Amino acid sequence: MYEKLVALNDQAVLESLDRQVLDEGSRYYGGVADPVNGIAWASHGGTPMVMALWAAALINEDSRYYQDRELLKRLELGAEFLLKFQHADGSISPGWTNMHSPPDTAFVVGGLAQVYELLESHTSGWQPLRTATGRIRLFLERTIPVLLTGGCHTPNHRWVLTAALGFLYKLTGQPELKARAEAWLAEGIDCTEDGEWTERSNGIYNGVSDIVMFYTAELLDRPELLEPVRRNLRMMAYLIHPDGEVVTDYSGRQDFGAKHDMAGYFLVSRLMESRDKDPLFAAITDAAGEALTHPGWLPNNAMIGYLRYPELRERQVQPVPLPEQYRVVLNRYFPREQYLMNMEAAGHFGRIYHSRLHLDFGAPVARQRSGDTSMTVMTETSSFLSLRHGAVRLLAVQLASSFEPGYVKMNRLEELPRGYRLSGDEFKGYYGPVPQDALPPSASGPVSPWYLLPHQLREVTHQQQHHVEAELTEEDNGLRLRVKCLEPEGMMTQVCFIFGSEGTLSGEGLVRLTETEEFQFWKSGRIRCSVGADWIELEGGQHEHWAKALNNTSYPSGCRSIVVNLMTPYDWTFDIRLSPSGNASAGDENGPSSTGEGVRGR
């Protein structure tokens, strides 16, 4: 693996050199232009990230750029650019958002502090390193004021800040830095017993939280902080599709529904494998290492990690196979409802700025895998089911209604002997007049703005409830999906099956609504989505109303959306059959869930 990292790092160095701005008249002189927008940024994925690649090559005898004078000059220019784009308060601005950003500064600090350590340890053997090393230290020292006073936006930002404060504490010994880190940690750790972080971001921010929590545990001598890292890595073993893609169907961040692999977990799983001698972590390391195509952004650069921890080059435990036959329910025992009931006491009244409360944190998710068949059953997101069978991808099954209107989120998940029952409730009422003694002065003025009225004091009248159920059961050749809603009567409903664009659709009941196959009604009969020898076949089309889409719904571009139109009351069944070329069963009754267990302790 070390040899692969060296090759990837050298390749990234070569590619980045052509993007460095060498025009002395440019405001971006010394920076490295972003390959997408052409602007040199001072962010953790911009020039500082490239500086880490260059530094790793310069000090590594196995790199073709070892002690390369031209590359060293480029590193010096990059450090000069970074100092020029550092604000007077010590912060940096990524450019596309988050101006004068403490957390984005922390991402950079967490990476460049490691770069500084490595460069400083090599300056005695190669004096020319001193200029670049000194500039990087100056940048780091200038960030101290902003990290001592700065705040965050998102849950994971807290731990990124904590790690950066730990690195600066190690560098300078200033006790205020450790105290600020401890203040963030005093908020408590937001990871369930089964290993889910608040943002449910398997593709991006789980890995971020893991690596920065590892650094924090090490820098502040808090080994107990490694426990959530262990839990998350164990959870991730059940969130990998057969092709190595990770489950992002219910993420609370920008990786939602996007393709991501395990690469971001490589360094932290390797560090934990080395520390714990855990064969499962070794297996995750191998899966992540296979996916690696770049050393990584800051502060999660795998090449830097291997240089800082030389022991990672020697494997001390052999991996076990990653699980391919299982049935687990994540967050089965998490007391989410209890936490939500206590939210009113927090006093924020549901308001949070430049972020979100992530009320879906800890919602149950069922995962089943049997060889090449991989299924996810979800709550508190716009889709409640996704299924991969061989090369065929059923990306989402969504249920939308005119009640709210929009997608119905399933709130509860109950495990059945051969499947699952989901249910979702929505409530919608009307609001009476504000009590006379609660009216503001503006109510008797010449104009009474709607937004000045105390709407929270209105009496709720004629409240209606929309209750939806979805029952999924395993059959000999696939699955049966039954959806049910008895009242209110006369509501338009849509069940949408979204397939990947690589699939070929066929079936007599399909009616195209566009020139392409991206959006079609499924009015009757049986349809099939095929990729090579693999297929998923559905039976149960229906068309009880003509609406193409309901309010507050949309269908993703680049996919195949198949829409069934129902009217309440309905009790409708879809049969989902799977080709024998994959594995016909979507799960294994002998998996953990059949004994009532979740992921914890495994």
Image: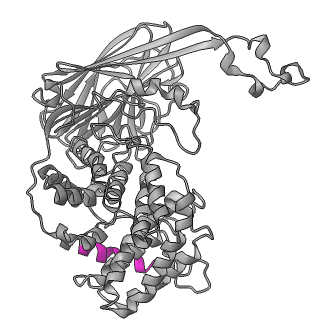
Instruction: Give the left or right position of residue 513, taking residue 101 as reference.
Output: left
Report x, y in % for residue 321: 10, 48
Q: Which residue is drawn at 15% across and 34% down?
A: 326
Q: Is residue 45 visible?
A: no
Judge by depth and name the residue closer to the eye, 220 or 440. 220
Q: Quadrant of residue 538?
A: top left
Q: Which residue is drawn at 45% across and 46% down?
A: 155
Q: Quadrant of the N terminus?
A: bottom left
Report x, y in % for residue 33: 50, 73
Instruction: Give the left or right position of residue 387, taking residue 451 as reference.
Output: left
Report x, y in % for residue 157: 46, 52
Residue 433, placed above or below residue 188 = above
Judge by depth and name the residue closer to the eye, 56 or 161. 161
Q: Quadrant of the C terminus?
A: top left
Report x, y in % for residue 324: 14, 41
Residue 188 is covered by the magenta coloring:
no
Q: In which quarter of the image is residue 102?
A: bottom right
Q: Is residue 318 visible?
A: yes
Residue 496, placed above or below residue 438 = below
Q: Residue at x 50, y 57 (%)?
A: 103
Judge by depth and name the residue closer to the eye, 424 or 375. 424
Q: Which residue is drawn at 35% across and 81% down?
A: 119
Residue 342, placed above or below residue 557 = above
Which secondary structure type mostly characterizes the magenta part of the structure?
A: helix
State which region is magenta: 6-21
